[in-house]
Structures are given as structure tokens and as C-alpha cells.
Amino acid sequence: MATSMTTAEFLGLTPQTDQTHALTMNDSLLGGGSGSLFGGVGLAAGLIVLEATADQPPIYMTCQFASTITPPDDLTISAEILTKGRTACQARLTGMSGDRTVLALLGATGSRREQHRLIGQQMPGAAAPEDCEPLRRFQDNESLHNHVEVRMARGMFGFAPEDAAGRGTASGDASTLFWARMPNVAHDAGALALIADYLPSAVGNSVNERIFCSSLDNTIRFVEPIAPDPDSEWLLCESHVEFLAAGFAVSRGFIWSRDGKLLASANQSMTAAVPRD
């Protein structure tokens, strides 16, 4: 396998000052049918900026999407440290394109001595990724989806067109399991944030219909500091839909390493709509 790049390198995120980074939008950062920023890109970029500013590993980040951004516009993310102690830091970040707010983020970093350990979730059983059909979306245009491999282990990938190979079959409930990886990107905290934005695909599965989702907010929490995986091993993504009503949906999920280690939890709220013909 070729040498993996960091998520910051994949995004093209470069420091401008100690607390400000910038990236220029390109097609690899797009998602969905609108040709705009893939939500996980905003979350991942915020995590990278916060970690660099605080010089501590991320604990959590939440992102609200105030507006969209498309190529070739620039996105500048600035961090404001709200409070920083010896073992933890809290910050507010803003993503701007010119004078327009695109992202509003809150996050925390920290490094503390572990005195107790309890993992309240257990990795669900799933067929190995090698035994699952690869999802092929047949996209004509370059997007983030060209850089993420997905294999359904349970349920249907509810973003994909109905004729996409490897899309899976609806599970009959509100939960899915799928394997995901970014083959050329070391799986660091930012990469997990990108992959976590695939969890809402369970919304379409829950009603056995293709559903377009547009994130209102996106949150990820890490169990412990993420040691970047340069081999980009498969990650098992467990997704559950909490509700789908009044044109909105809420999902939550977990990301597991292949050997059964819980790495992160994620949740988001979003608009949900049947795509137009």
C-alpha cells in the first residue's frame, strides 16, 4: 500500500496563523447531489484546527452548518480558546468564506490520567468486509465518495441510487452495519469524522427508500486519543435512526476498529427528503 496521507493533507488544510487554517474547495470535498461541502469535511477540518491550536487530542466536536460552500471558494477556520487548563481545553471555532459564516463549531480537547474504564457498548456481529459486496455508486462527477470505500454488512445504504451495486437490502428496522475505509488516508481523528458522516445513510434503510439528508449539525466524540492507522484498516460503522418525522431525522452511531475496539460515537440531526425524479 502506498504511503498514506494525513486527513489534513487530503483536505488541503494549511495553517495561516497559530489559530487559523484555510482550504480551497475542490471536487474531492463535495458530497450529495447539490455539489456542495460534504458535512464531514467541515467537522474533520474543525477537529484538525482545534487539535493544532490546543496541542491536545480531541475529545469531542460539534458542528452546525450555517450555509453551503462550493469550489473554488476558500474556507477559513479560526479557533478561539474559551478556557484551557492543565488537562482539558474548550474552544469555539468559526468557518468563514469571505464575510459569510459557513460553519459554527464547539469542541474540547484533553489528556488525563485514566482511573476507571467502562465501555458501555459491545461491537455487533458482522460478516467480514471481504465477504460483503462493495458499494458502487456509479457517480459521474468527482466527490468525496470516490475516496471512501463502503461495504454493507446489514441493511441498505440509503443515499445510493436504487440501481447501485452493493447497495444492500433494507434491514426491516432502523439500524444498519457497514464497513468503511479511506484507502489512501491514515485513519486519524479527522478521517473518522469524515466516515461518521456516512452514518445517516440508515435513514433511507429505515423506510426502505432512497432518502436525501442534509445535515443541520454533526457531532463526534472519541473514547480516547486516536492513534492514526497508516494501514487504513476497515472500520465497522453501526448506525441507528432515532426518529424520522416532519421532514427531519436524527441518527446516532458508533465506529469500531476491526478488532472490536470502540473508537468513537457520533450523532446528527438533518433534513430528510425523497429525491426528485
Image (spheres, grey):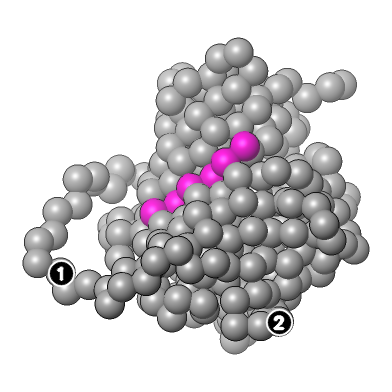
Secondary element under disc 1, as helix, strand or loop, is loop
Residue 216 image point, x, y percent: 62, 37
Comparing 155 with 159, the one in front is 159
Q: Is residue 199 above or below residue 142?
A: above
The stretch in magenta equals 216-221
Mark 1: few/some/many CA within 10 Å (<14, 14-19, 20+): few
Q: Which residue is mark 2?
A: 16
Residue at the extreme left: 115
Residue positioned 56% across, 54% down in the render: 105
Horizontal side of residue 55 vs 74, given as left or right: left
Q: Residue furthest bottom?
A: 3
| The residue positioned farthest toward the front in the image shown | 82
Q: Position of residue 259 (x, y in %)?
A: 30, 62
CA gap, disc 2 and disc 1: 35 Å
The answer to whether residue 44 is left or right of residue 235 is right
Q: Could you say which is closer to the camera, residue 195 or residue 183? A: 195
Determine the secondary structure under disc 2.
strand
Q: Residue at x 69, y 59 (%)?
A: 95
Q: Is residue 44 in sight in this rendering?
A: no
Three-letter amino acid code of the residue under disc 2: Gln
Mark carried by residue 27: none
The quadrant in which residue 33 appears is top right
Badge 2: how crowded within 10 Å, few (<14), some, or many (20+)? few
Pointer 2 and pointer 1: residues touching (CB < 8 Å)?
A: no
- Relative to 193, does residue 198 appear above or below in the rendering? above
Left or right of residue 199: residue 161: right
Query: Dot 1 corresponds to which residue?
Result: 114
Q: In the rendered structure, which amino acid carries the disc numbered 1? A: Glu
First in residue order: circle 2 vs circle 1:
2
Q: Is residue 166 magenta?
A: no
Depth check, mark 2 against mark 1: the one in front is 2
Tell me: 116 left or right of 267. Answer: left
